Structure formats: C-alpha cells, structure tokens
Image (cartoon, rainbow, N blue to C red):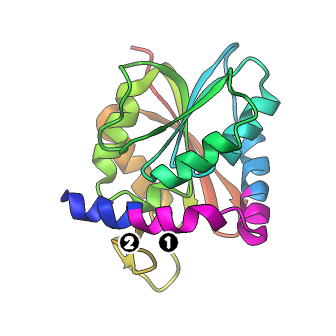
Amino acid sequence: MTSSFFDGKRQFFDIWASNYDCLLTTVFYQAIHQRLLEFVELPPSPRLLDLGCGTGRLLDRFARTYPDLQGTGLDLSLEMIQQARKRNAFDDRLDFAVGNVESLPFDAEQFDAVSCTVSFLHYPRPEVAIAEIDRVLKPGGRFYFVDYLPFEGFGENSIYPVSPGGLRLYARSQREDFAKPVGWRCEGHYHLLIRIVLTIFVKSEN
C-alpha cells in the first residue's frame, strides 16, 4: 500500500486531534467503551495493546478498571499520541507510540489482548493487519474487534468516502473470514451500540 494512503489518514487525524474529545465524540465513545468492558476477559497482570488509540480514553478506562494492567496505545497520528501522552494519568502503566498497524513496532507474542475500537474501518488491507495482530498476540490471547456493520443498500466490499482513503465496513461473516488464515476462533459477535458490533477472537494456544 502506498505511503500516500497512510499520509492522507495521518494528516486527517493530526488536524482533528486537538478537538477530537469534543462532547459528541466523548459521549459516543464512552458508551461504546462501557459496553465493551462488559465483555472483556483478561488474565492477571495483563498486557494490552489498543490499536488506533486516539487520545487514549479507552486505555485510561482499562487502567482504572484493571489496576494491574500494563497498556500500550498505538496510533498513526503523532498529534493524537501527543494528546494521549499529555492526558495520561497512569505514566507508570500506560505508554503511547506512533505506528502503522501493517508493521507493528513490537516483538512477537507480547500482548494478552489487543483492542481495536472503530479504527479497523480505516485499514486498507485487513489481512495484513490481522497477520500483524496475530504476531504480537500471545497464544490464547484475545482480539477485541469493535466496528460498524455495513449499512443497508451498500455491497459487502463498498468503500465509504467519509475520510481520506475511505472507510471499509465488514459483516460478521467477513470478519470471521479474515481470521481463518491465522486460525483464530471466533468466540462471538455482540451488539454494543447502534450498528456497532464487537467480535471477539481467540488465538490458538498450539
């Protein structure tokens, strides 16, 4: 995928970063995060990676819910990461890094869980993203995939021209198909809010 695609995404979110936590997005994401945490299962002293972490609100909530959690947030936008670092109330347990989901800057099998909340829709090559997530997940680890379902009247492979490069939305069956090459087990699909659905995958322990 050309660097111009990711440059467009990066610039879009760099511009938005300082105003990202406006009232609308704050209320919207708080509702999603609250619902997501109802389904999360983590081992003792978990290590969690949040992809497309934005200003770090979800990781903050994880840290408040799990006092022994060590969390890392990754985002393509430097401006988003700077906002997250500025607001980080858990310097000893949370850290934030700039990076691309297609080439995660982490060693293999580092994380007990990976979350991705309304961010996967920006990824141009879902199969590459899934392979990288699989690489950094520990055996038995979980991937929490939260995103919109496709809207009625659009085809399965439609690209929604809402942001640079467009948005890609996946049905439940498409999500499961992406996970098949890496051998993940789909634990289930759970409605969170409006057309937003959580899909939980578990990495094989073999």
Badge 2 or badge 1: first in the primary sequence = 1
Q: Which residue is mark 2?
A: 156
74 up-or-down from 33: above or below: above
Residue 65 is drawn in which quadrant? top right
- The reply to whether residue 109 is visible in this rendering is yes
Which residues, given as a range, are shown in magenta?
11-29
Classify residue 200 as left or right of residue 170: right
Task: Mark yes or no: residue 53 visible.
Answer: no
Mark 1: which secondary structure?
Answer: loop
Amino acid type, mark 2: Glu
Q: Is residue 167 above or below residue 126?
A: below
Q: Are marks 2 and 1 in contact (CB under 8 Å)?
A: yes
37 to 120, vertically: above or below: above
Quadrant in the picture for residue 21: bottom right
Residue 150, which numbered label? 1
Residue 11 in percent (x, y) is at 40, 65
